[in-house]
Image (cartoon, grey):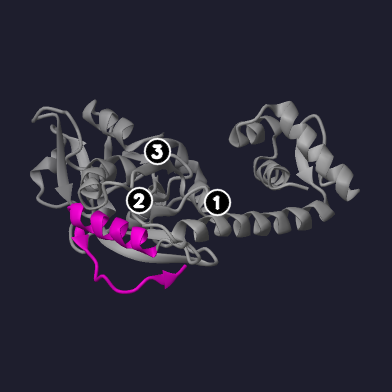
Amino acid sequence: MTLTELRYIVTLAQEQHFGRAAERCHVSQPTLSVGVKKLEDELGVLIFERSKSAVRLTPVGEGIVAQAQKVLEQAQGIRELAQAGKNQLTSPLKVGAIYTIGPYLFPHLIPQLHRVAPQMPLYIEENFTHILRDKLRTGELDAIIIALPFQEADVLTLPLFDEPFYVLMPADHPWTARQTIDAEMLNDKSLLLLGEGHCFRDQVLEACPTTRKGEENRHTTVESSSLETIRHMVASGLGVSVLPFSAVDSHHYAPGVIEIRPFTAPAPLRTVAIAWRASFPRPRAIEVLADSIRLCSVARPTAKGDAQPA
């Protein structure tokens, strides 16, 4: 068996689809299929149950894939140990961020990092928290920037800053006469939200109690795939929404189109944190990344403190 074959079965187990797994492994579907079959033949067992509509792990396959995941992590550890003997700030760092953080953080973070670590370029990915978690665990990413809470075995997290939420509304909305907006005023008939899978959506719903109603009211909430699309719909007069502070001024609308108001105290907020594998051998790179995020953040920093296991 080879590490490549182990990577094939781990990826196929995650995707449950030969085509998507092959795409993630950057090989053709026949190549991946042959590799998986070769490993099954060598082991003398079926790792996957195949049908026209699905690919599922067999009971013995579950144990094999779990062990393969550990082997891949250990192999990645060997590569990282070799890298640790070099300058920790002279090779690329693979960083992921959730969709509601990345677009507003990276334009400030990258120039700051270039000043303090010019030989450490970033490989960047924006995605959902659960996908970033998987890629962190498999070594595809070195660190991820997420919103707490976040828990994962053998992963350290470090809170970076607290970011308050603000209410976004059309400029002619009657609420513009108010200095602050009570969370109870937001309801599911007028609130524009991100779609399922975004943790910011869940945080907004948690902050606005009147949105947590029965299933019969869910259809009245407009959902979108990005904060910028939501901003455009608010500008058009479709409703109001909630933004994290870092996204408030990141737009190209002229004055008199949209307005922002803070929440009435205590304002809801999220804590942005960095997470990385406890075994990651470039602690200096993580430290520089975390310090740079704090420096370029316009939100209120938290106490620096120590990293905590997730």
N-terminal-most mark, 2 or 1: 2
Q: Disc 2 designates what residue?
A: 90
**Mark 2–mark 1 distance (CA, rounded to whole Å):** 26 Å
Q: Is residue 263 visible?
A: no
Asked if marks 2 and 3 touch (Cβ < 8 Å), the reply is no
Residue type at numbered disc 1: Asp
Q: What amino acid type is highlighted by mark number 3?
A: Thr
Q: Label 1's element?
A: helix
Q: Classify mark 3: helix, strand or loop.
A: loop
Would you name the residue on which mark 1 appears? 134
In primary-sequence order, the first of circles 2 and 3 is 2
Query: Is 57 left or right of 305, judged from the image as shown?
Result: right
Q: Residue at x 87, y 46 (%)?
A: 42
Query: Would you identify the image quadrant in which residue 55 lies?
Result: top right
Side of 192 relative to 143 (left or right): left
| Residue at position x 57%, y 54% in the image | 76
Is residue 117 a member of the stretch shown in magenta?
no
Segment tinted magenta in the rendering: 283-310
Q: Tell me the residue that label 3 is attached to.
A: 221
Coordinates of residue 29 in the picture (x, y in percent): 70, 28
Does residue 299 belong to the magenta stretch? yes
